Amino acid sequence: MSDLTNSIKVSTEAGSQSEKTRKHNTNLTTANASERLGLNNPVFWYSGGFIAAFVALALIDSDLLSKVVNSGFAWSVDVFGPYWQILLLLTFIISLCLAAGRTGSVVLGAIPTPELGGFRWMSIIFCTLLAGGGVFWAAAEPIAHFVSPPPLFSNTDNAEQIAFNALSQSFMHWGFLAWAIVGSLTSIVVMHLHYDKGLPLKPRILLYPLLGERVLKGHLGAAIDACCIVAVAAGTIGPIGFLGLQVSYTLKVLIEIPDCFTTQLIIILFAIALYTLSALSGLNRGMQMLSRYNVILAVILMFYILICGPTDFIVNGYIQGVGTMLDNFIPMATYRGDEGWLSWWTVFFWGWFLGYGPMMAIFIARISRGRTIRQVIGTISIIAPLTTCFWFTIVGGSGLAFEIADPGVVSKAFEGFNLPGALLAITQQLPLPLFISILFLILTTIFIVTTGDSMTYTISVVISGETEPNALVRTFWGVAMGITALILISLGSGGITALQSFIVITAVPVSLILLPSLWNAPQIAVRMAKQQGL
């Protein structure tokens, strides 16, 4: 009887132990999942909660959201607009000085040779930073400035000169200053502090030289990271939503596919799948492949339009447009004459690009190990802007030439600020219009996909604290941004418009985070030059 009792007792204890083990393993699995997703990181809750609140308010009361966002937008451009103009101008000037001097030979990233080949490296940078704006805005902005000349260039009646001025103004918005703010000085600071000092690859380290150790831990650092994530998420969600709206509109015009939410849904789901898979594959596979092929496609389209389009106007427009921009560079960068015009053009773009600044610095730091300061700044602040200007001349300049030759052929399609309408009107004037229009749609999609995957990757790096974040956190943020875009476009174009204006608001704290790089980057560059015997 005692043997039976002991047997039962042992069996019960074994069962109890097995149950404890099972519960422990379950808790461990749950804890691991939470940890992998970053649920224990306050940055996740700050950034995710803010985005969720924005979407919730859009669903509950879109009118109230619009009022709040519009008020915040007006306050941001009025108070911070002048500061942003000076910040971007100084960033560009200081970055050029660092590249031109002995500091230009400083090697960043604590390795002697680059990890990525030159073409692959530049392809990723071009595709990530240019994004879909480089297609639809390249077509739309020059014609917008042609129809309604900027205040600084409103003193001529010559159509061709108006066209060159329109190109020049577009170059200013998408040229040197825009590119410099998203990864010149800040990349130097981030690469030094991460690779040489061992600090985590997070936006908060931009304030480390100013605030010290206290910024690395606690809620202050979490709040800084969250602000940067919200800004770049808003800046990425907007283009994803516009991709659905613009491609849907274009497909209806080209092949009569209904322009409705179902079509937009399919397009965005396809984009989500592409950029999430690309982000999961990592820097050395999906991102490189997509960027490389997209650059090749863009180059093919450039040469096609250059040869088959208005060649003389494109060449003359680029030369004169760049010349006009350089001649009026300081007046254009510091113009304050018409604040209403500024708020919807220059300051709006500056706010948009500023929002990408800290996160793009992290991304550039991740792909630029072994590059010199001169290579990084020369590519980002000079080569990329000049290439962007040429692209704008190819697309938008062709539209201006067609408009001058046949008034209304592009401007009529652009009425109501119809960005895809302007692009379609231009492609319809070229040989093989249907084929070329489809290629532009593919180009736009991949541009936005490459931005989506790089920003998904970068947000995941910040949340996880790892240079190779796990698949779970990458998938979550990739899908989350896409679903947010879907929710907003389901409310009509007003949801995405509100988000676009909100981007400018998010630039307010981000611009303050970027400010110390104006003096920290030169100090770091000089110190590293001495250490490397330069």
Image (cartoon, helix red, strand yellow):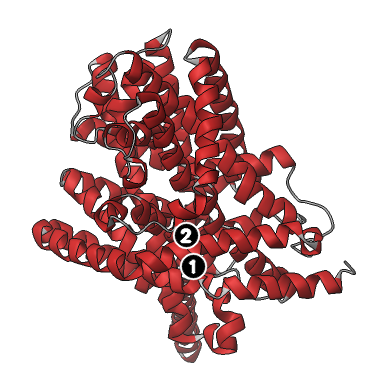
Comparing labels 2 and 1, the label whose residue is closer to the camera: 1
Viewer-nearest residue: 80 or 329: 329
User: Disc 2 designates what residue?
Assistant: 473
- Circle 2 residues within 10 Å: few <14, some 14–19, many ≥20: many
Position of 231 compared to 526: left or right?
Answer: left
Say which residue appears at 49% left-offset and 66% top-offset.
87
The residue located at (39%, 62%) in the rendering is 231
Residue type at the position of mark 2: Val
Q: Quadrant of residue 528?
A: bottom right
Instruction: Give the image location of residue 216, x and y in percent.
Output: 55, 82
- Residue at x 77%, y 56% (from the top left corner): 370
Percent across and percent down for residue 446 are 47, 34
Q: Secondary structure at mark 1?
A: helix
Residue 15's disc is none
Screen quadrant of the N terminus: bottom left
The residue singled out by tag 1 in the image is 463
Q: Quadrant of the C terminus?
A: bottom right
In the image, farthest residue toward the bottom: 2
Q: Amino acid at mark 1?
A: Ile
- 30 or 8: which is nearer to us? 30
- Report x, y in % for residue 362: 58, 62
Report the Cα–Cα distance between label 2 and label 1.
8 Å
Mark 2 or mark 1: name the one nearer the start of the chain.
Answer: 1
Quadrant for residue 517, please give it. bottom right
User: Considering the numbered disc 2 on the image, is that residue within a helix, a strand or a loop?
Assistant: helix
The one of 210 and 160 positioned closer to us in this rendering: 160
Above/below status of 373 relative to 413: below
Label 2 close to label 1 by CB (< 8 Å): yes
Q: Is residue 172 above or below residue 519?
A: above
